[in-house]
Image (cartoon, rainbow, N blue to C red):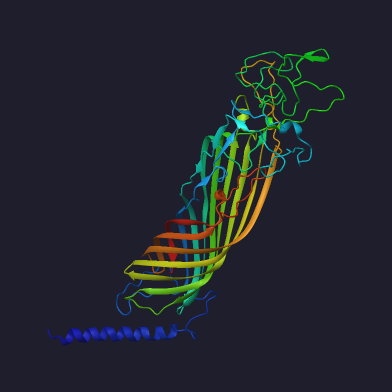
Amino acid sequence: MSIHNPLRRLLLVFGLSLSATAPAMSQGLPNNVSEPEFVPYVEDLQLFEQPDLSPYGRGVRPPEGWFGSVEYLNLSVGAPGNSTLGNTNVQLQEVYGLNSSTINTGTGTTATNTGPLGVNFPGTTASGSLPGVAPGTLINGLNQFNTNDITLQSDFTSGSRFEFGRINDGRGWMVSTFTLGTQTQNEDLTNVSINFANQPRGFVDVHGPNVVPTPQTVNNAFFIGDGYDDDLDGDGIYGRHGRDRGTPQGANFQNPLDGIPDRENAGGPDVPVDYDDAVVLPTVYSKVFVTNKTGVWGVEAMKLWRLPFSPRGGVWELFAGPRYLNIDDSYYVEGLSDNRNPQYWLNPLGDTRFNTEAENNIVGGQFGGRWSYQRDRWQFSTETRLFAAANFQNIRQNGGYGSLANTVVPTPGIGGNAFVPFRDDLINMQVPASFQSQLNAVEFTPAAELRFNLKYQVFRSVYLQLGYTALYADGIARASRMVNYTLPGMGINPDQNKDGIFMNGVNFGVIINR
């Protein structure tokens, strides 16, 4: 058969098809080629169309129009540096112990009521934050150290990131925000000694075999108080309670001394307080609970510039704009003291609780760039941001101590005739007490962010993305490092507000048209 017959048939079929479709095509064209969209470029998204992966021409072109993303974050938030439970300038100090005594200097019996607390020592120099109060000179004192440094570990926390924007003809904009769940770290400690810059000072009542209200000699293995300040310097004057005049015989007193302060003669001068019996007291907590919390969130708005498309060199984008970053750090410490003999003398403050919160409001400008390269359905991208900002810091602290100061101290194993003392009284501060402090500061905060992402193109405008995100910021106030362990008001250390924070981890999400 001649080849001309099949050729004629093919041309005939093509001609009939063309003549049939031409009128329909001409009738289907509207006067205006496209109707205006309420939101421009939305119809061009075509989310679930198959992607054009043709390697011919200029290859896979970067998408334009509206874009957005929703991502899950799992980042490790850097913990603050080591912080000491206690004043770092007072790593060691000598405090009272059960076998301690003091030196009889004689100055304690000549005190005059000229100090702010009714206490003054002629010929002595006041120490501590309150003048006019000085303890006796200890013999056989105990060396008290700051026993614990708080070493918090970085931990992972979940969060989310949302981005939304539009790009057309190489120009566009983008808004991005992210938030991380609060990272909480706990540390529980036992038998913790904490040194303060102005250690508690006062009188003790743990010695003396005589028990009131029925004086008698008993075994003092439980350090039962007798209701009077202990005469630690042995001069027969019992701190604030007077002197031992002897054994009472009616209205008179006769030898020997019985170890109990006695009333003075009617109309006679009062015996001055013997401040040689006052001592620097220990502050040992049976349990300490530490909680550190960190929350992070931020928002940014940027102008985008896409450089001319180069399929072999990938796609380059530049961006710049303002950014806000919030880092909120809180540090809570609760110290518990035993409220029973013989442990109660170890801490006249009783329970102590305080919370320090450091809020960093970081505002500034950033610039950065993004490079992406796609082959078939896979796309790799990397982007970086450099951030310079002012950090408006707001540090707040509140708390209290001495909640057990006005409670009696139970004594186990002793009958009802045992005197149950109150906690030791202090002469350089008032207990119970509460306090609060606030510090506002402005610091320079440089920061940088780096991202690596691998995307898979599922449809024309839908991608699945897995990546890595890292962010570092300097000049950050971390609450645990800003506590000033100084009684009676604690306080905030203004010189420890320049720490760094590093966050990094994985991100996973759905990307639309980007």
Residue 430 as seen in the image, left or right of residue 36: right
Does 326 appear above or below 229?
Answer: below
Q: Quadrant of residue 205?
A: top right
Residue 394 as seen in the image, left or right of residue 239: left
Count how many numbered circles sit on residues in the image. 0
Of residue 386 and residue 183, the one placed in the foreground of this image is 386
Does 141 appear above or below 454?
Answer: above
Of residue 61 and residue 148, the one placed in the foreground of this image is 148
* Relative image position of residue 320 (x, y in whole percent): 50, 72
Of residue 505 and residue 33, the one placed in the foreground of this image is 505
Q: Quadrant of the C terminus?
A: bottom left
* Relative image position of residue 249 (x, y in whole percent): 80, 12
Q: Quadrant of residue 421?
A: top right
Of residue 483 and residue 164, the one placed in the foreground of this image is 483
Give the residue at x 20% y 85%: 7
**Residue 62 shows up from this direction:** no
Does 143 appear above or below 15?
Answer: above
Give the residue at x 70% y 17%: 211
Q: Quadrant of the N terminus?
A: bottom left
**Furthest-right residue in view?**
267
**Residue 115 shows up from this direction:** yes
**Furthest-left residue in view?**
1
Does 44 appear above or below 410?
Answer: below
Q: Quadrant of residue 212?
A: top right
Give the residue at x 16% y 87%: 4
* Relative image position of residue 26 (x, y in whole percent): 42, 86
Residue 98 as seen in the image, left or right of residue 111: left
